[in-house]
Amino acid sequence: MTIKPQADIDYTHVKEKPYYLSADTEEELFRAAFDARLPVMLKGPTGCGKTRFVEYMAYCLKRPLITVACHEDLFASDLIGRYLLKNDETVWMDGPLSRAVRIGAICYLDEIVEARKDTTVVIHPLSDNRRILTIDKRGEILTAHPDFLLVISYNPGYQSVLKDLKQSTRQRFVAIDFDYPQEQKEAEIVAREGRVTPETAQQLVALACKIRRIREQGLTEGASTRLLIYAAQLINRGVPERESCKAAICRPLTDDQRLQETIVELIDDHF
Amino acid sequence: MRPDNPYAEMLETLDSLDPSLAESVREVLERADPPIAAEAVDLLVNETLWGIVREESFGRAIAAGYLKLFAALKSDKLTRYRDLIRAGGDRGTTVGRLLAIHLIPVLIDDGSSILDYFLAAVKTMELKGTYTLLHPLEASSELIESGDRKSATVFLKLLITAFGVDLNYNQCQHLSRRLPQAARDFAPHKRYWQLEQLLRVVQADVHLSEYFLNGMDKGLQLLSPAALGDFVSKALEICRSSTPSARRFLCLDSQQGFETFTDMQVAVSLREMQPRLNRYLRARTGRPISIRPSSTIAGLSAQQIGDVMESCSDGASVYLPDEIAVFDHRSKNADLYRCLLRFEIGCHEFGTFDFDLDRLQDRWRRCPTAQPAFDSHTRFVSLDHTSEVQSDLDRFFKLFPLPGLAADLFTIFEHGRIRCQLNRRYPGLIRSYLPILQQEGRQAVGLLEVLYAVVALDLPSGPNVDLGDDHQRLIERIAAEFEERTEVLALPVETSAEMVLRTYRDVAAECGKIAATGTPHYGNGRFKVPFNRRLRPDLAIAASVVADRRAGLIQKALENRGYRAYRADIRKQLEMNKGVLDTEELLKIIEPVAEKSKPGHTNHQPLEENFTELIVGELPGVSGSVTGEDGGLSCPTTWYREWDFNLSDYLNNHTCVRDRRVSGQENQFYRRTLDRHRGLVNRIRYSFELLKPEGLKLCRRWIEGDEFDYRALLDYVLDKRAGRTPSERLYLKRLKEIRDVAVLLLVDLSRSTANTATGSTERVLDVEKEAIVLLSEALEVVGDTYAVAGFSGTGRLGVDYYHIKDFTEPMNASVRQRINAMTPQRNTRMGAAIRHAASQFDSVPSRVRLLIVLGDGYPNDLDYKKDYATEDTRRAISELRSRHIHVHAITVNINPEDNGRLDTLYGEIHHNVIANVLELPEKLWRIYGAITR
């Protein structure tokens, strides 16, 4: 027996409208891709709004959203499903991918590059015009619900030889580039999400721009918008600005003492 | 010789012995004014002859000495000179010659005591041997000639003391070089008291001097005079109980020595601050600006470097003092460095050097209440920019009757403007660092200094006892006006120039009143800015003269098309885009000419689509983007950056690596090697077989997996029946074991590999080649992807990288021939070769990437030696590590005691030393197996 899919639909819907400030034409692109049911790849550094964007689009398009965080020990069975032993019976349990395929949800595979390559190929038949998922263990070929959409995210700055997307996977997707928003917009986002004054948000964004310049000297990725929002939230709760920035921006970014020194100097300049 | 020559007769004898000498003497005598007395010339000739007879160079030295005495008008010293030379010459021609040369500065200098010390020093050293005299006497002459008589005296006392004790030959040799070197190494403004301390040390025990000098190199030279004196006193105290402890103390090897030194150390050097300051600078500006010591500013005399602390910037660098010892605490001095840097960066960030005279003119015209600052000088002459190299700021100052005063006023207002901008953008910076400047600025006396304190440093303009009421009122008025003007958001640099125009007349009038009471006329920088922060437009223009010229030509080309742009804007764009014109950027700064400036000049034409290319094409002598010459070779070249540890920064596009393909030589070398080491080859094959992975591995009892593990299922059921909690581990998974290694063997083909290996008749390189052959066999067995390459070259533009085997190439006959064809080449520029090797890995998707560097020494090339080479190589290796390429070095044929430096170069665990290169074939493949297990 299988668990009925209907029960899932309710809890996978995005209930409240998430806040998202459009940077460019990504919304239009995504809608067009959804209309054509083309799989979408979101490319960009960590913390620049990819997941938030998917939630937002799921809300706008009124589709359920199922998110899978990919990692190195993710097996095909984790995505597709497995038999479980329940009360002396073997019961088939759908994985998140199969569930999404059945109910026509948006399936969002976050950081696909972390997963093993033999797991990643599972999505190949879903991401071309066949739109099928093969469940070997049940001998079932599942045809995707007409509303099913596959979305993946990918951080190209990772720079690991082992962890890179193969061409055979990459070329099945429509790609949308994400980057840290332009200064004015980023300040708006930080002010809203962090609930701080626009001036404070602008200082945080100016600080982040400077830290992002250190990137080539030893910091693999610059300060993400998410960290700025954390800092803003701390400031909002009464933590002094310098302390908030050190806790939310400086220490998470790096353990290198010299780089920390430089970041602290920049923080001290701004606040 | 001319018959009417007055000296002809006197020089006749000399002429017969040494005509060229006589000729040169005669030339000098003829030029002498007043003419030399006959007796003096006679003396010269006689003594010269006396000398020549003993040895030619001695005679020449004597002649030269006399001529110098004549030139310095020291005729009263002639007799003394003669006596001393005669006495010396009688003891030996070497001594005589040295005295002839080095007595001269002593005699020319007026102090009598220095002569006594000199003679005493010579006498003492002579007792040890004439070989000790050369270098010390050279140093002594240098000191006296540079005007540093005090140091010279101490130095001579030092020699007397040092050589007055029992020393063996080696010790004498060593001291005779070391002491002069130390005297030269000490900074001129500190030399005297540092030599005094050295003297104290030597008086206690001459053998301590070496340790003291080591300590000086390590940092004692940063101590203040009093602190250094205390330190030496402490060391001498320790010496009374234990000489070894004193030694360690002096050279800062002991804990006590180091702690005492750090506690006393007040001065901070730029060198130690540079890396941190650089990181901050890069982060704040994102531009390639470097930090340099102010001793490198062109045109500073040695005295200036020592006395005056200066900080300034040109477009490309910020200059900070070499050393700061203003405060009593190290941390405060370090803070001062940070403060100076932050304010200097303000010039770059807020466009001080973007000043444009035309733009000022336009703004001034548009200003409704323009009061001309000077009547006849309100002409802004559009000068021909291409003829002389002068910044617009200097041109602006020259419009005023007192350019120096205009420059001072501009400094005041510009520093004020930068302060306002910094306050807006970086409130934390102003809060932390402005007080340091204010503290210094509070001591202001005089009109301009107080004005600076009020406008530039935002100090309150309270009543000042020194200034009269008139001055006070003037300052308040100017401050209020400045305040008003800087409230607007847009504050370009021309704002400061406008303030100068508005205030010059009144300030000049007040200064005229001061001048009437006798203060000097105005030059540049007559008033003292706190910490000597100057604006140096002359340096700025010198740094960007090429870009400025091009900007001028581009400006003209645009004018021809009926468009205008400010030259400073064009120059800035060229500098930001590295000399390349960008159409989009250019369109932002140009505008059509509104008014017809010349009759017959038509309206602007619409710009062609590719107008930037056309403009660039019209420029004379245009060079394209940075490309290097490949020396006429058709091999592909790649440019790499190099790390300059002096600047703590990269030099971009600094080295050029040429890819060379070697043509192999037909030979039986490969086969012969395998035959010779047959036993070894079999062993290699066996052990590397064991390294191969076994294929699929089955893992049982996992929490999740592909299939049920039926044994675990049985246990599950049994446990349930027995009432126990069953385990969750019910699954099986199959893991593929992959050995995914790629290795590149990079062989140093420098000249030194042609040396014979110790204990053999073969060259080092031949033994290395054998080792490579064996390693290749091993790698073929285990199946790893591998490549072999060699490198050498000369200079930064000629690094050769020889491809012997690429990753994708199979091992075949031509590869074997190439291995055989490897021959010793030239130098070792390791950094560039390592970076190029890293790029070879881009084509390889392996999980584990390894670079093995096989060499026989240290990196060494033209301009690439010692610390510089070590630091660049280390940097290259760390770049590779951040790209997940492991680096391992194997150094052969080297003295194991040099290990320390190899540790610094490669890191302690990442290198092996094989002292006897003959062991390399045996060891190389073992090392490889160990690394990749």
Image (tube, rainbow, N blue to C red):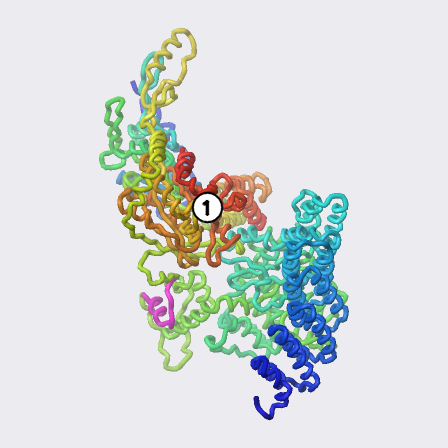
Amino acid type, residue under disc 1 in the picture:
Thr
**How far from the left and from the top, in percent, is residue A229?**
50, 41
Judged from this view, the residue extending furthest toward the top is B722
Category of crowding for the residue at label 1, using alpha-carbon neighbours closer than 10 angstroms: few (below 14), some (14–19), many (at least 20): some
Q: Quadrant of the N terminus of chain A?
A: top left
Q: Quadrant of residue B767?
A: top left
**How far from the left and from the top, in percent, is residue B726?**
41, 13
B316 with respect to B222 (left or right): left
User: Pointer 1: what residue?
Assistant: B758
Judged from this view, the residue extending furthest toward the left is A130
Between B655 and B896, the one lying in front of the other is: B896
Judged from this view, the residue extending furthest toward the bottom is B4
Say which residue appears at 55% left-offset and 54% top-offset. Answer: B425
Between B163 and B445, the one lying in front of the other is: B163
B561 with respect to A207 (left or right): left
Q: Quadrant of residue B396?
A: bottom right
Give yes or no for residue B620 being in the magenta stretch.
Answer: yes
B917 with respect to B105 (left or right): left
Give yes or no for residue B84 being in the magenta stretch.
Answer: no
Q: Which residues are magenta?
A: B610-625
Say which residue appears at 66% left-offset and 48% top-offset. Answer: B251
**How far from the left and from the top, in percent, is residue A197?**
53, 46
Residue B531 in sight in this render: no
